[in-house]
Amino acid sequence: MKLTTWGACGTVTGSCHLLEHRGFRLLLDCGLYQGEPRADNRELGFDPREVDAVVLSHAHLDHTGRIPLLYREGYTGRVYATSPTLKLARPILEDALKLMKEDAKRARRKGLPAEEPLWSEADLRVFAERSKPMPYYSPRKIGPFRVTLKNAGHLPGSAFVEVQAEGRTLVFSGDLGNRRKETLPDPDYPRVADLTLSESTYGDRPHRPFQETLVEFAEVLGRTLDGGGKVIIPSFALERAQEILFYIRRFEAEGRIPVVPVFVDSPLTTRISEIYHEIQDAFSLEVQSLYRRGLDPFAPQRLRYTQSVDESKRLNELEGPAIIIAGSGMLSGGRILHHLRHHLPNPKNAVVFVGYQPRGGLGHRIIEGEPEVEIHGHPVAVRARVYSLGGFSGHAGRDELLDWLAAEPRIVLVHGEDPARASLARRLRARGAQVTRARLGQKFTV
């Protein structure tokens, strides 16, 4: 088998890797670059017409976002993934197309060059028609490969991929989950492989103990809400927003925080939350038990999903304490920006980051303590209290990555910024593993 890394090499987005054997070309993920100013999402590095099949690890846009582009550029094969991944990918891709159209429209209105969307509704329909559900632990023959999906614990339906051919094994981690999470099952362990292609997002640091994160989260919520302030939470629409709702509901039930209005200001999050009811088997036993008892595990008492832009804007006029959860999680756009612009100057409020913030991005600058930031072209004073709760990460921390890779002799690191990859590589080499930090277009033999 020959592997070529075509994405997520020194970045945490753009996952895309091509596996070849006996003239058959299997693509592992084909994700969008997000927040990477030098990345060209139209440049794939290979001819989609020559790809025979695609396997997706999970539904996040940085792993699925260029699949419709493949079809636009002539790909005709199938896309294999778990059923929850395929259900969740559809609204995520539809939302991405909507944002691309809005960006082009905004540029034209300002007289600027408008970059047209990468793909269309027709390309998305072809993706849906050509998708094939693939359950966990059920090997499938795809060309000369024997492919098995196993639980990665990162999202509902997320998988890592084991590919075998002629006595050789490749393992592709996709994104690995945080073992201390309560809403999802823990990741499975991989078999010992001839080559392991692994993510390294948090390869340079462990997560703090999850229970400590929950204690701090409850304290921040209670203190801010009791003081009449609002808690603004930038969040990814898939998994993170629902997990935050899960714990707000629990804190209310335990009397640890007051019951206040909780707004989810994201149409995409609304759609995903509806799909959650259809994929209950993808969650932890605790979540499944709540569903069986007729309870919504992800619904605080005064939960409200906003839909229109006008509803979103009215939240800025809201009196009294409240919690507002909005996207995008990495502050690359979306409704969270106008909430931050409105609420950051008020010292009664709190902004709680519960997800990864790229170095140099708006979120990273706020966390680092910049007294003023620019949002929508306007200077905004940062007077609200700012908290970064890394324990909520959906990714495995350094110690969990080392544990997951413990038996693997030959490892290629992707999906991590270079400091994180370098740190993880040093630790893996210290215990005898052969480790490479993949470059874009680099080739490996399995």
Image: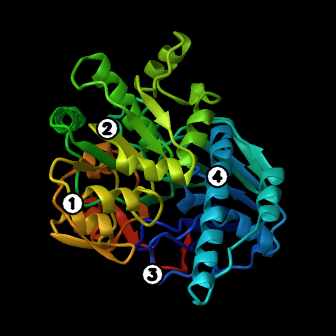
Q: Secondary structure at mark 3?
A: loop
- Name the mark nearer the viewer: 3 or 4: 3
Measuring 23% from the left and 18% from the top, which residue is drawn there? 255
- Name the mark nearer the viewer: 2 or 3: 2
Label 2 packing within 10 angstroms: few (<14), some (14-19), many (20+):
many
* Residue 8 x, y percent position in the rendering: 48, 69
Q: Quadrant of residue 254?
A: top left
The amino acid sitting under disc 4 is: Gln
Q: Are marks 2 and 1 in contact (CB under 8 Å)?
A: no
For disc 4, the marked residue is: 164
Q: Earlier in the sequence, mark 3 or mark 4?
A: 3
The amino acid sitting under disc 2 is: Ala
**Cα–Cα gap, marks 2 and 1:** 16 Å
Quarter of the picture containing the N terminus is bottom right
| Marker disc for residue 37 | 3
Q: Is residue 300 left or right of residue 382?
A: right
Measuring 40% from the left and 50% from the top, which residue is drawn there? 235
- Name the mark nearer the viewer: 3 or 1: 1
* Residue 442 x, y percent position in the rendering: 52, 79
Q: Earlier in the sequence, mark 2 or mark 1?
A: 2
Label 3 packing within 10 angstroms: few (<14), some (14-19), many (20+):
few
Q: Secondary structure at mark 4?
A: strand
Q: Earlier in the sequence, mark 2 or mark 3?
A: 3
Q: Is residue 306 left or right of residue 179?
A: right
**Cα–Cα gap, marks 4 and 2:** 52 Å
* Residue 380 to residue 405: above or below: below
| Marker disc for residue 322 | 2
Q: Are marks 3 and 1 in contact (CB under 8 Å)?
A: no
For disc 1, the marked residue is: 345
- The colour mode here is rainbow
Q: Earlier in the sequence, mark 3 or mark 1?
A: 3
**Cα–Cα gap, marks 4 and 1:** 55 Å
